[in-house]
Image: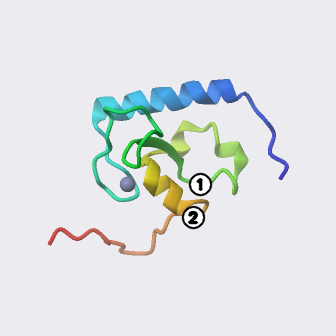
């Protein structure tokens, strides 16, 4: 893969700020809609926060550092999603409340 190693340190900062933003707003996971555990460090438990990319970096590396491409997610949801494009079929409502 021809991924260039652009400033990882800058990205770490972005990720930290994104986490803090989610923490402030108590943002839910964009993949499953459930609350994220902001009391633990990002990436340490299944329910902890991860910065997910709306368009996977593998598809468009130029969007890795674009905050407009960031989404709050659970670590586990991010892992399960892998590099798949988000499932956004028309009229999708997979959430069931009952
Ligand atoms: Zn989730």
- Labels in figure, total: 2
Ligand 1 falls in quadrant: bottom left
Q: Position of residue 81 (x, y in %)?
A: 52, 61
The tag earlier along the polypeptide, 1 or 2, is 1
At a point 85% along the width and 49% down the height, the residue shown is 2
Coordinates of residue 56 in the picture (x, y in percent): 62, 54
Q: Which residue is mark 1?
A: 55
Q: Position of residue 88 (x, y in %)?
A: 46, 68
Q: Quadrant of residue 62?
A: top right
User: Residue 37: horizontal and vertical position, in percent?
Assistant: 31, 40
Is disc 1 surrounded by few (<14), some (14 to 19) or many (20+) residues within 10 Å? some
Image quadrant occupied by the C terminus: bottom left
Mark 2 C-beta to ligand 1 under 8 Å: no
Q: Residues within 10 Å of mark 2 (few under 14, many from 20)?
A: few
Residue at image x 48%, y 40%?
43
Q: Image height check: is 10 above or below 79?
A: above
Disc sitting over residue 89 in the figure: none
In the rendered structure, the answer to whether residue 61 lies left or right of residue 77 reads right
Q: Are marks 1 and 2 in contact (CB under 8 Å)?
A: yes
Tell me, what colour scheme is on the image?
Answer: rainbow
Q: Quadrant of residue 42?
A: top left
Q: Of 29 and 91, which appears nearest the observer? A: 29
- The residue sitting at the right extreme is 2
The label shown at residue 85 is 2
Residue at 50% x, 61% y is 80
Q: Is residue 15 above or below residue 48?
A: above
Residue 66: quarter of image: top right
């Amino acid at each position: 893969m021809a991924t260039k190693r652009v400033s990882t340190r800058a990205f770490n900062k972005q990720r930290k700020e994104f986490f803090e933003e989610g923490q402030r707003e108590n943002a839910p996971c964009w993949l499953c809609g459930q609350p994220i555990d902001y009391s633990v460090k990002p990436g340490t438990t299944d329910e902890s926060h991860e910065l997910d990319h709306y368009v996977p970096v593998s598809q468009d590396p130029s969007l890795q550092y674009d905050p407009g491409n960031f989404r709050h997610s659970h670590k586990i949801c991010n892992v399960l999603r892998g590099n798949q494009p988000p499932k956004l079929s028309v009229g999708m409502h997979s959430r069931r409340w009952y």
